[in-house]
Amino acid sequence: MNSIHMRGAALDDTQAISALFRNQIAVWQRLTASGRVEDVAYDSLNIYERWLHGGPWMSVETAAIHLSHLLRGAGIPLVVEAEGKIAAYAEAYRGTEPEPFGEHIHVAQINVHPDFANAGLHDLILNDVLEQARIARLARLTANCIANDGQTQSLYTRHGMTAISRIQRYNLPAKSGQGFYKVVEQMAENSQQINNWFMPVGRLGSSRQQWETLWPQTWYSIAEIRERRTHRLNFSASGQEALIYCQQQLYNPRAVEVFMWSPKPLTVQLLTALRDWTHREGYRTLVLSVNDDMAKVLGNEAEADGYYEDVYAVKV
């Protein structure tokens, strides 16, 4: 094999990175007007239909927008070149959160082309990002892993990473409640707003990763995404401030997925206010991903749906 080279991604890499992700899709499908799933050619899908197969990397158009966002400072996009082509892509985010995370680099994803599955590129990427963290004098390298992904777990443990937190997803009924709270729309996109804040709800990935993915109105040029109800809110309840992003679920319009950033962990008072506000907005179910400590705040009405991720970390 020719020399392997890892570098920062550039906008000129967009087409190759998009192809790397699209290569993972075995069958392209869409729903007919009658609700039936049909197999179709990729070229017959519109941008949104491609998006539904895996997000912005599914089309060159949206991939360019996403990569441009990262290159302007939102994240750290990386590529590995081997045999004259893009063999792997990785995406990382630098952030600062309260312990146990501290100042860290979070590896959001690693995608390796099947032709290079045994070339050690996963290890190369983690070693490189770990070295970046050392140079920047950060406290930790972190990454999330779906609970039943044994291969990724083995990769992380091989690099000295251990599970430090578990994030589990719950459904909680929206409900009218008593208490005083204030809520206003919050559109400012600067991630400095959440610097060293907790992310007590929705931390499926790092706090910075979730912010840069969700908060900016990056995808409002796509009509189908723009039409989904989303709310960017500044909440204040019993002295606790929080920035909260709520998004209507795609196939269950009466359910809303919640993401929260706050100087403090989740409290019963803030949760009561959130349940009341969502009920007034016509939702019936809140979808909340929280760690084990925050799950205790949800109370007995919360029902786990069986999905969870572990957060792995290693000190630099």
Image (cartoon, rainbow, N blue to C red):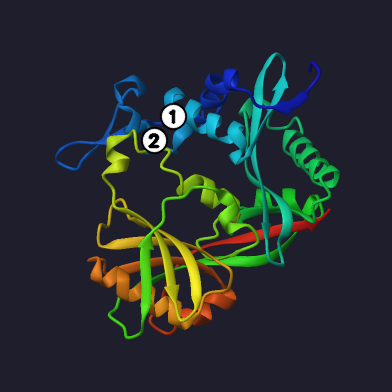
Where, by quadrant of the figure, is residue 173 drawn? bottom left
Image spot of residue 9 (x, y percent)? 65, 26
Disc 1 on helix, strand or loop? helix
Image spot of residue 151 (x, y percent)? 67, 48
Task: Kindly identify which numbered label has been placed on residue 51.
Answer: 2
Q: Relative to residue 306, is residue 147 drawn left or right?
A: right
Indicate whether 269 appears above or below 106.
Answer: below
Quick one: which residue is furthest to the top in this view?
A: 84
The residue beneath circle 1 is: 62
- Work out whether residue 225 can be spotted: yes
Which mark is first along the chain, 2 or 1?
A: 2
- Work out whether residue 306 can be spotted: no
Where, by quadrant of the figure, is residue 116 drawn? top right
Quick one: which residue is furthest to the left in this view?
A: 34
Which residue occupies 25% across, 62% down? 254
Number of marks drawn: 2
Mark 1 touching mark 2, by CB under 8 A?
A: yes
Disc 2 on helix, strand or loop? helix
Q: Amino acid at mark 1?
A: Thr
Image spot of residue 51 (x, y percent)? 39, 35
Indicate whether 43 appears above or below 183.
Answer: above
Q: Amino acid at mark 2?
A: Trp
Which residue occupies 32% across, 55% down? 249
Circle 1: is it few (<14), some (14-19), or many (20+) Cα within 10 Å? many
Q: Relative to residue 57, is residue 246 drawn left or right?
A: left
Report the front residue among 17 and 97: 97
Report the front residue among 74 and 46: 74
Image spot of residue 211 (x, y percent)? 52, 51
Indicate whether 262 appears above or below 177.
Answer: above
Which residue occupies 79% across, 18% down? 1
Instruction: Give the CA separation, mark 1 to mark 2.
Output: 8 Å
